[in-house]
Image (spheres, rainbow, N blue to C red):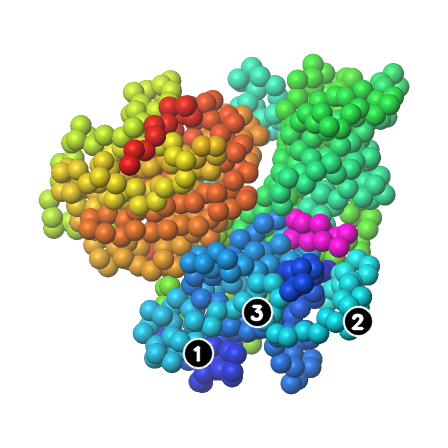
Amino acid sequence: MASQIFSKVKSEGGSSESGGSESGADERGGNNDTFEYFGWVYHLGVNSIGHEYCHLRFLYIRGKYMEMYKRDPRENPGTKPIRRGVINHTLMVEEIGRRRVNHGDLYVLRFYNRLDESKRGEIACASPGEVRKWMEAFDRAKQQADYDLSRGQSARDKLKLESEINLAGHRPRVRRYAHGLKQLIRIGQGPEKLLSQASNLGANSESDVYFEADGADVIEAHEWKCVRTLDGVRIFEDMANKKTGKGVLVKAVGVVEASADTVFEVLLSLDRRRRYEWDTLTGDVELIESLDGHCDVVYGTLDLRKLSWWQSKRDFVFSRRWFHGQDGTYTILHFPTEYKKWPTKSGYRRIKMTACSWEISNISTSSLSPARCLVTLILEIRSKGWIKWKNNEFSKFERTLPFGMLSQVAGLKEYIGANPALTFESSTVVHSKTSGVSMSSNELEDAIGSDEFYDATDGDSSSSDEDDDEVSNKQDKKVKLKNVSWAIASLALKKTSAPDTSKELNADVPPLTLDPSQFHGTMRHGKGEGDSDCWSSPSGSGFMIRGKTYLKDSTKVTGGDPLLKLIAVDWFKVDECITNVALHPKCLVQSEAGKKTPFILIINLEVPAKPNYSLVLYYVADRPVNKNSLLGKFIDGTDSFRDSRFKLIPSIIEGYWMVKRAVGTKACLLGKAVTCKYLRQDNFLEIDVDIGSSSVARGVIGLVLGYVTSLVVDLAILIEAKEEAELPEYILGTVRLNRVKVDSAIPLEG
């Protein structure tokens, strides 16, 4: 394993040692909680003479402070850090994906200051799982810094925040290069100590994040029916998709005895010898071009004589795009593509590969159980022999390319099962002892185990002095409760969570009558389901949100009607992404009707493209917002609090199935996935969502724009409930975008 991250929370009577943090006292217990994260990473950069480097470093986070060492300070007392500083609230962390470094693949995290983007730095890990843990660690440290500022600490402590950690390039110190310059040139493949370091987590590792394999936040229209089993792998057919008269949507599902990180690395590996052991179709593959950290183009060959003796040799080119969700789920999309720069091999015939989607999800188990994951391969087929084959009748389907692709799941399962060493190379990277004592403020709630990019289920935190048996029993009990809760939820989908307007909005004030004719947007309001290039506002019944007992049994219920009313939608075309739309003189917020409205929430989705676009949604409240409600705290809260609570649930109602797999059906904490800026003035709050700030989000939105004219997309926005008093959740607002035309966007005049 290329990197390990350890974390712990400890209670102390006073401030920690130099380099630690003085965290806030718990309101209930009066003790100080100091959380720590530490582990090995690669530090990437360019030195003062322009040479790129990749150094093995030990990273240590104590509260809001971070230190970087050449050696592990726990094993080498007296070791001084080579870098140190504060992780303040202006530090932005971006996952930029996979990169080739010194003949090996690493996953890179980029750091920059949102006030000064020239201050940049990068670290790298061996797997996306490790990257995700470090992102959670940095996010928690930022929350600590933000909380300390809100407490109004002494000027001396505030001055410390100015000493921000510097991960950019070379350190500003004098180095002698005149003598022995050749010794500075690294020979070989870079640092190998970490790559060859075996994992000591094994079966005793204890994850503080609860991963749930199921749990979509959208009620999907799929009707999956198991039609066959193939070498221990279940084969499903989508009965709902069959009714459309198009191709049959089929998936193969198998349980693999390894972590999702391990399976992801095996699937992405282009190593010929490894693929020969499980892939009967595409054993010969090679990388043509790496487009970015989450997308590349691959060339491969097929020997179809393995399926039928008369088939000739074929070759193909396809692009791969992959995503990693906060719940640990990986999605890999394979698209057939044309690449004229790569000619057909002699003796081969170029074919168009079938598009498919791989999904790998961790299966929740106790901390003492081996890692397991669910592997799903989805593709669309048009074979005439499919019906006979699924009915166990003789069919030529077993000699087709789709059948060979479905069989890859069984091959992958057997390959990993026959190589136990792979399970120990798993990137289960967190060995933690979390404290049962919560932090002293809502703003400082632990981000570990909570929902971020996707709506994963909260982890069960256990006391740091509990033994392994107690922890195991608690987690086993949690798994059983979750299974029961989902069974109950599936039988009671009609149960909804209606917003308590008396708690969120001031019930003592009579509601304002809103006249839709007084609010105008550039996008037309739709008149019916068959209408195109328009918007509407559906109910929340198609979304699953947290119920009243969610913190106890993880039960979700169908959403009710939105609290806020969508009154207009703007669809702008701009050269550069725009912010502060509400301040534009022609914005409806500045109109007479807008100024009289008790409260307006503006969501500005900045869509990166050529040119750029902005989708602006305007939601209004017909009564003033209660200051002490969750919505009131969100409106007037800190940016860090807003980032940790602002949630969006996407749902593609109609469209290409591959786009549906790319967008997903799980909630997204936008402030943790992309950069969000907030403008609070007068009677409105504007949230500017920079989708282009994330390479993953850019890839997804690029795919969506390619099919947008045939898509019907539902979005629900809400404020995530994390405490019992805030439950059940309610849907803040919804929007349905019906087959939007890109060319209908109107330029925003100055």
Please state which of residues 226 and 611 is positioned toward the viewer in this rendering: 611
Q: Residues within 10 Å of mark 2 (few under 14, many from 20)?
A: few
For residue 271, what is the image quadrant?
top right
Which residue sits at x=69%, y=35%?
297
From which residue to which does the magenta span run?
Answer: 98-107
Residue 68 disc label: none
Q: Which numbered disc covers residue 37?
A: 3
Q: Is residue 712 left or right of residue 154?
A: right
Residue at screen point 37% across, 23% down:
744
Q: Which residue is mark 1?
A: 22
Name the residue type under label 2: Gly
> Where does label 2 land, which residue?
180
Point out the image quarter for the C terminus. Answer: top left
Is 103 covered by the magenta stretch? yes
Which amino acid is tagged 3?
Tyr
What is the CA distance from the residue labelled 2 to the residue labelled 3? 37 Å
Which mark lies nearer to you, 2 or 3? 2
